[in-house]
Image: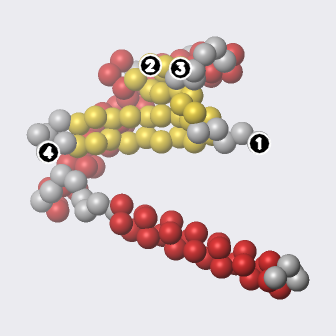
Amino acid sequence: TQHLCCRFGCHLFPNGTAQSFYEVTLNRTAFLSFHVPNATWERRWPGELPVAAFAQAQLMKYPITTQDLQYFLNTTCVSILQAQSARTGEVSGRSRAPLVLGLVLGSLALLGMALSIFLCTGGSC
């Protein structure tokens, strides 16, 4: 089983500048990234991996697609954030770290409880 994950978006900083990104990981290891300023795909895999070179070559075959991606990340994404910050009056929203931490800890507690019930009802306790 292979786990491929794509993450993209943009950050709007308080001074008005923005930074866009597109990252691809394979099995939680950096695989490819899109260099937004010059619309190119770059290999991130540590060492030589033929599939990384193949994927990069295939993605670079379509300049219109890479230019559209560049436009989306630099213009559309940033415009959405600017419009959102104009509505709320702030550049970055509230931190969601406490919510995420609470959900993760709650999920682990439920998993532990379910595992305990399974073991106890299975005759192991």
Return the disc, 3 or 1, that comes first in the chain's sequence: 1
Return the disc, 1 or 4, that comes first in the chain's sequence: 1
Residue at left offset 34%, top offset 31%: 71
Question: Badges 4 and 2: C-beta atoms under 8 Å apart?
Answer: no
Disc 4 target residue: 14
| Place of residue 101 in the rendered image (x, y in percent of width and height, measured from the top left) | 43, 64
Q: How many marks?
A: 4
Return the disc, 4 or 2, that comes first in the chain's sequence: 4
Instruction: Report the mark closest to the observer, 2 or 1.
Output: 1
Question: Badges 2 and 1: C-beta atoms under 8 Å apart?
Answer: no
Distance in Å between CA atoms under marks 2 and 1: 28 Å
Disc 2 target residue: 40
Task: Look at label 1 and name its amino acid.
Answer: Thr
| Place of residue 44 in the rendered image (x, y in percent of width and height, measured from the top left) | 52, 23
Instruction: Report the mark closest to the observer, 3 or 2.
Output: 3
Disc 1 target residue: 1
Can residue 53 be seen from the camera position used here?
no
Task: Look at label 2 and name its amino acid.
Answer: Thr
